[in-house]
Image (spheres, helix red, strand yellow):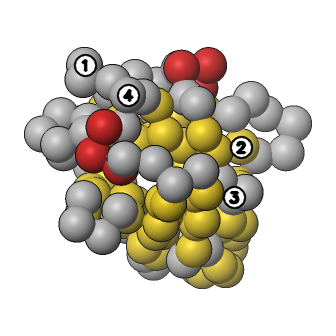
Amino acid sequence: VQLVESGGGLVQAGNSLKLSCAASGLTFNYYSMGWFRQAPGKERECVAAISRTGGRTYYADSAKGRFTISRDNAKNTVYLQMNSLKPEDTAVYYCAADGPWIGNPVPDPREYDYWGQGTQVTVSS
């Protein structure tokens, strides 16, 4: 199984970024997918997660209204659109796969079976 994130970078506060995560080696539409982030000295946290069909989502309070998670099962890809970025969004962002799972997407990283290598997002003030 391979999860490959892309789309990170350096942006100014208030701007947007769209992260992508391409999955291979698994039956993608059997898995819930999550986006997590980890800043230096902090625990890894889930910012958003999406059910295997895309019909159910989870957002951390810090992401609600600014981030949108989506998936394209035909392309084996999950996305995270991040708008109105803040300096506190600076972190390494990881995608992860949980499954096979038919329930609601969950924010607990211990439930996720596969992880990408991460992509750095830096937001300057």
Residue 63 showing in the rendered view: no
Q: Are marks 1 and 2 in contact (CB under 8 Å)?
A: no
Looking at the rendered image, the disc whose residue lies closer to the viewer, 1 or 2, is 1
For the point 65% across and 78% down, the residue is 9
How far separated are the C-alphas under marks 4 and 2? 25 Å
How far separated are the C-alphas under marks 2 and 3? 9 Å
Secondary structure of residue under mark 3: loop
Residue under numbered circle 4: 100
Q: Is residue 104 above or below residue 95?
A: above
Residue under numbered circle 3: 118
Please give left or right for residue 64 compared with residue 41 in the image.
Answer: left
How far separated are the C-alphas under marks 1 and 2? 25 Å
Q: Looking at the image, which residue sits at the far right? A: 41
Residue under numbered circle 2: 38
Q: Residues within 10 Å of mark 3 (few under 14, many from 20)?
A: many
Q: Position of residue 76 (x, y in %)?
A: 35, 62
Residue under numbered circle 1: 103
- Of labels 1 and 3, earlier in sequence is 1
The three-letter code of the residue at mark 3 reads: Gly
Please give left or right for residue 17 compared with residue 121 in the image.
Answer: left
Q: Is residue 12 above or below residue 115?
A: below
